[in-house]
């Protein structure tokens, strides 16, 4: 699979410091920041700093170090937001949209972490 990355996408501009963001957590290879149009009381986007279009691109081509860093960043965000189900939180939904059918708007891999209310059924439409 040949993946084509657009350097002018909005998250690339955030990573270059050209557009501001509200950072929740930053690591060597990943950045977590608040979504500008939150769909829940907590709505954080986690992105790798590397140039990956979507999750299958990342899973296929990222280094082990980047993959571990990204995964641990998700854990850090859940800790910071206190949303881990159990003693401290009530849970969350994690979504990563890809491509046309996934209705991905920004072509840089991002995981949405939404929490802070009961989020309803996962998909609104049938078939
Ligand atoms: P997706 O449809 O999965 O590609 O989601 C893209 C998300 O990026 C949407 O939830 C937008 O609200 C969010 N978004 C777009 N521009 C920005 C920005 N400058 N800072 C933070 N979030 C953004």
Image (cartoon, grey):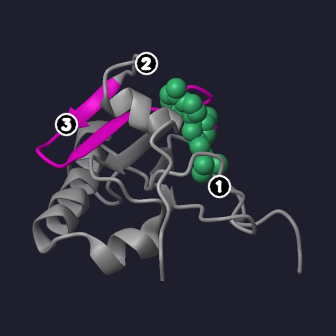
What residue does disc 3 label? 26
Front residue (pair 68, 87): 68
What whole-number distance in Å separates the C-alpha atoms at marks 1 and 2?
20 Å
Q: Which residue corresponds to the image point at 45% horizontal and 75% vertical from the top-left?
A: 56
* In the depicted structure, whether residue 124 falls above or below residue 13: below
Element type at mark 3 = strand
Q: Name the side, left or right, on which 118 lies relative to 20.
A: right
Q: Which residue is mark 1?
A: 104
Query: Looking at the image, in which quadrant does ligand 1 appear?
Result: top right
Residue 60 marker? none
Tell whether circle 1 marks a residue whose Cβ is less than 8 angstroms from ligand 1. Answer: yes
Mark 2 CB lies closer than 8 A to ligand 1: yes
Q: Is residue 21 above or below residue 109?
A: above
On the image, the x and y values in percent for residue 78 come to 30, 49
Secondary structure at numbered mark 2: loop
Mark 2–mark 3 contact, CB under 8 Å? no
**Residue 83's x, y, as percent?**
36, 48
- Near mark 1 (Cα within 10 A), the count class, few <14, some 14-19 or many ≥20, is some
Q: Which segment did they paint magenta?
A: 23-40
Vertical side of 122 occupied by 42: above or below = above
Is residue 41 something one can see in this rendering? Answer: no
Residue 64: % across, % down? 14, 73
Foreground residue among 79 and 58: 58
Q: CA distance from mark 1 to mark 3?
A: 23 Å
Q: Is residue 53 magenta?
A: no
User: Residue at 29% across / 75% down in the picture?
Assistant: 61
Q: CA distance from mark 2 to mark 3?
A: 16 Å
Q: Tell me which residue sits at (64%, 38%) in the image.
A: 39
Q: Is mark 3 within 8 Å of ligand 1?
A: no
Residue pictured at 17% horizontal, 71% vertical: 63
Residue 70 seen by the camera: yes
Q: Is residue 33 above or below residue 55?
A: above
């Amino acid at each position: 699979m040949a993946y084509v990355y657009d350097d002018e996408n909005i998250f690339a501009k955030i990573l270059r410091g050209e557009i501001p963001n509200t950072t929740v957590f930053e690591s060597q290879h990943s950045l977590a920041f608040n979504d500008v149009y939150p769909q829940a009381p907590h709505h954080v986007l986690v992105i790798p700093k590397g140039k990956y279009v979507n999750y299958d691109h990342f899973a296929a081509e990222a280094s082990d170090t980047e993959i571990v860093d990204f995964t641990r960043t998700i854990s850090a965000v859940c800790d910071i937001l206190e949303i881990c189900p159990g003693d401290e939180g009530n849970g969350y939904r994690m979504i990563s949209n890809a491509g046309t059918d996934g209705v991905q708007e920004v072509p840089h891999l991002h995981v949405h972490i939404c929490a802070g209310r009961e989020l309803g059924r996962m998909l609104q439409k049938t078939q």
